[in-house]
Amino acid sequence: MSKPAAPLKGRAARLARLMPSTGPSTAARTPFVLLVVLLLGGGLITLLLLNSALNEGSFRLSELKRDTTELTDEQQALQRDVDSRSQPDALEKRARELGMVPGGSPAFLNPDGTVRGDPTEATAPPSPSPSPSPTPSTDAPPDPDAPAAGAPAGTSGSPSPSGSVSATGPDPAAAPSAENSPPPTSPGR
């Protein structure tokens, strides 16, 4: 049936004499199998740890993107608010609410100390619609602390823009007196 194995010649014969063929040795294969199993197991565990770290980073990245979007929206809303309040009409309205009036003609000092230009004092222009002052009703007795009907508007006790009553402060709509107030100054622009 089968032929006997042919005798080995040359180099194969020499190798066969150095390594006796007593059959497959399981003791020599065990460390190699354990090494391969440990390498494969370590690789799988490392792969799982890496995958979970990437997923955690992905969740953190999506959270940061959402926060960035919310903060960008808030920043744009604040910028729109600043832009609307920085328009010349809005600035003029707010300045008038604070009692400011447009400046007069400016004058400049030359380096030698001479004045160039004709300075004029800033005065409030007449308001287009004067605010009605509260008049006492005819049924109620007059208040002894209230000013008379012909009293100047500066001492009327009308509410100021902040909501408090100023009994001695000047009314922002009234023109400042030319004698008592120095000309307004503003920072250079």
Image (cartoon, rainbow, N blue to C red):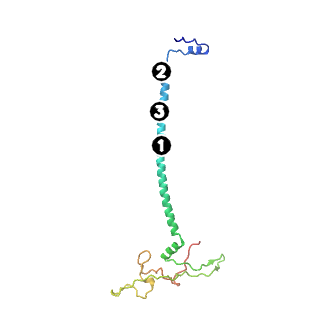
3D distance between C-alphas at marks 2 and 1 = 40 Å
Query: Earlier along the polypeptide chain: callout 3 or callout 1?
Result: 3
Q: Amino acid at mark 2?
A: Ala
Task: Report the front residue among 48 and 104.
Answer: 48
Q: Amino acid at mark 1?
A: Ala
Task: Report the front residue among 121 and 125.
Answer: 125
- The residue beneath circle 1 is 53
Q: Amino acid at mark 3?
A: Gly
Disc 1: CA contacts within 10 A as few (<14), some (14-19) or many (>=20)? few
The outermost residue toward the right is 112
- The residue beneath circle 2 is 27
Q: Residue at x 49, y 44 (%)?
A: 54
Q: From the viewer's perspective, is residue 161 above or below residue 177? A: above
* SS state under label 3: helix
Rendering coords of residue 120 (x, y %): 58, 82
- The residue beneath circle 3 is 41
